[in-house]
Amino acid sequence: MGMGYLTLIILTTVIGLGAQTYVNGQINKYSHVPTSSGMTGQQAALSMLAFHGIGGVPITQGGNGQDFFDPRTNSITIDPNAYGGRSITALATACHEVGHACQYAQGYWLMKMRSTLVPVANLASNSWMLFLIVGFVLYSMGSITGGNMMINVAIALYAVAVLFHIVTLPVEFDASRRAMNYLETAGLPASERAGAFSVLRACALTYVAAALVSILQLVWLLGQRNN
């Protein structure tokens, strides 16, 4: 693997840590800024669901950092700070997850595609490295054909994981767009909307970073095949 792989590890680590540091900074900054509406994240989520005429979506309090919409149960989980918090971060987080619920209710095709890819992407993410290692072992044993075949399988599997990261981007961006549209319609002041946008933009950066890291990894894998 050599210096090329070491460089890749360093680069992807820097990208990941940089994105996470920025996200944490924005979330912490606006978690201490209350909104003029006084609504909690849970109340804002219920209000946004009602605004779109969407019912039957339970909103539950999860653990720390648990903010997600589950299409399997058509439910929203938000962490304690967002659930009961009255900050800009709480409202932005809760409304973003409602954005996913709106996507599900309206049959947003990219969300359907991502949901379809989840089990395949999980399998690919958990198995591609095994095939790559087997490929390198076969190479070291002199089996060029077998090594190539295993590396190609590893690349194909990892490409599925990369596709999942790429499809995730517009899904997340659209959920944030829906959240911002609702917050504007609900009359949130412009200064508070700017803060909410900063939070959502920062969170979106984590998905951009994940996609970039996966693409860099795929490029490296393709280089291994060519070598």
Image (tube, rainbow, N blue to C red):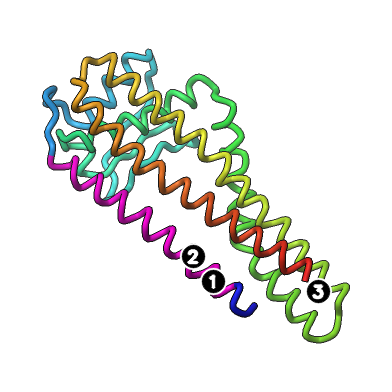
Look at the numbered disc 3 and give the secondary structure of its residue. Answer: helix
Write down the residue under mark 3: 147
- Image spot of residue 73 (x, y percent): 45, 35
Please determine whether, in this image, residue 73 is positioned above or below residue 153: above
Q: Earlier in the sequence, mark 3 or mark 1?
A: 1
Q: Give how far apart the Cα atoms at labels 3 and 1 are.
A: 24 Å
- Give whichever of 80, 18 is nearer the camera: 18
- Give whichever of 90, 196 is nearer the camera: 196
Disc 3 to disc 1: CB gap under 8 Å = no
- Image spot of residue 222 (x, y percent): 72, 61
- Image spot of residue 221 (x, y percent): 68, 64
Amino acid marked by disc 2: Leu
Write down the residue under mark 1: 7
- Give whichever of 5, 39 is nearer the camera: 5
- Image spot of residue 166 (x, y percent): 57, 43
Q: Of the residues tagged 3 and 1, which is closer to the observer?
A: 1
Please determine whether, in this image, residue 58 is positioned above or below residue 18: above
Q: Does the magenta segment cover residue 21?
A: yes
Q: Give how far apart the Cα atoms at labels 2 and 3 are.
A: 27 Å
Write down the residue under mark 2: 11
Q: Does the magenta segment cover residue 117?
A: no
The structure residue drawn at horizontal position 48% and vertical position 69%, both measured from the top left corner, is: 10
